[in-house]
Image: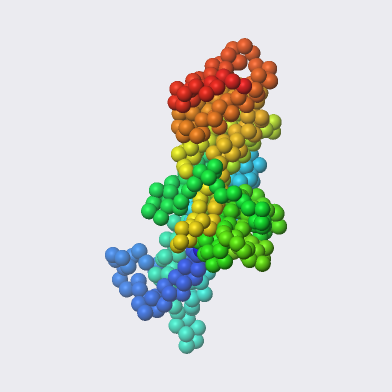
Amino acid sequence: MTHRLATIGDAARSRLWPLPVLAIALALILGVLLPAVDTRLDGPGTGDPGGLQSLIFGGDADAARTVLSAVAGSLITVTSLTFSLTVVTLQLASSQFSPRLLRTFTGDLFVQGTLGVFLSTFTYSLVVLRRVRTSHGASSEFVPRLSVSFSFLLGVASVVMLVLFLAHLTGQIRPETMLRDVHSDARSVLEGIRSRQAGAQAPRRIPVERLPQVPPEARRLLAPQSGFITSIDTSVLLRRCTEVGLVCLVERPIGRSVVEGTPIGWVWASSAPAPSDLEAIATALASDGVQTGYERTAVDDIGYGLRQLTDVAAKALSPGINDPTTAVHALGHISALLCELSSLDLDPVVAHDDDGILRTVLLQESFARLVDEALTQLRRYGAGDPQVMSRLAQLLDEIAYRCAPGQREVVRGQVGRLRATVAAQDFDDTERAQLELALAGVGHILDARGGANGGGLTT
């Protein structure tokens, strides 16, 4: 349930409409309540002007209608302009950087707040406008002076917000800002995972080599739907497996793409005999404990931030964009995230029942796969650029300083692959010597921190 709520909360934060809709609802309520206050005050501001009274709207019904109509009419125009600028920004971010950055833009609270202010001002002015009444027959004139004054203040605030929005938008489309925001979101995910690993209720983990052997009578755990695994509810899997005496092994971690009806793990009985309806139980387990969606989310997906940064760098290296500087900047953020990932415990998560019997095993994304996913495309697409190759070598140098002993062979393998890529390129002697020196430095760091084990110069 916690995973499901977190997924729903992330979906709400990454949508453009929730905050503006909430602002419209508040404007409707305020547009009804504030004129009622005006009615009780019996038209404040009709007396001798002075003090606060001089700040309250003092015109007649026609003047009030003019002010409210002007505010409402101008704000719907400004809102249209704001939406147009936002759509242009989203199109630019999608075509020049990465479609996966659209979540960052649509989840921007400043953009949502600006639209909320504009739409709520328009809605409030319309609601108050219908309460203005001229004298006609037995009906006396009613001018909600406080309400009109508040509409005027909202109009002024909207003008200020428009200026701030334009300044904010120009900053948001800068590559440095987008990379910073993606990095910040990814760090928040990692910090959340790290705090749970250090907490009193931290899940138990075991090394991969100590995983239980899948028995021959085990049945496949099949994906309930096509898409990406967005969350795995360990508590549900543990409770269901305990009830029927099963062990569940989920091989696909959060963030992986799955196809409905294809294997994502195994289910078997912890003791003989196995239930006769084991396949039906496995189907129910997958349906209740594994949630999928058609897009990846930042909730517990440690590789999503890396995927976004890699996409930006790969897009920058494409012939149509040809912006290696942005790719180098993205590699700096990728290096920082990989260094932080190296300190996480990525061993499989296990859960036992009250009797200490193993019930669930969840495999995590390995450090080797995360590094490979972040670097393989960039090594290929940036192979002919010495600047990109040099930054990749520096990235491996930085990871070598931070990685754990069990992760050093991953870095050695990446050094060998990068050296092979460099050897296949048409670099001049100076560029080749500089790159070789950088790669040799990574090998020396690994040897100094872990003892010689083949050296960093092997291919």
* Numbered disc total: 0
Identify which residue is drawn at 45% across, 53% down.
203
Residue 390 sits in which quadrant? Answer: top right
Against 192, residue 450 (above or below) is above
Identify which residue is drawn at 55% across, 47% down.
211
Q: Residue furthest left?
A: 51
Residue 108 visible at all? no
Residue closest to the eye, 435 or 400: 400
Q: Residue furthest front?
A: 272
- Whole-percent x and y of residue 273? 62, 64
Instruction: State the quadrant of the C terminus.
Output: top right
Residue closest to the eye, 257 or 211: 211
Residue closest to the eye, 355 or 435: 355
Identify which residue is drawn at 51% across, 43% down.
207
Against 2, residue 443 (above or below) is above
Figure colour scheme? rainbow
Residue closest to the eye, 175 or 30: 175
Identify which residue is drawn at 37% across, 66% down.
56
Residue 222 visible at all? yes
- Whole-percent x and y of residue 417? 62, 26
- Whole-percent x and y of residue 290? 59, 58
Against 162, residue 127 (above or below) is below
Q: Is residue 79 left or right of residue 55?
A: right
Q: Residue furthest top?
A: 429
Q: Is residue 57 left or right of residue 398?
A: left
- Whole-percent x and y of residue 201? 41, 55
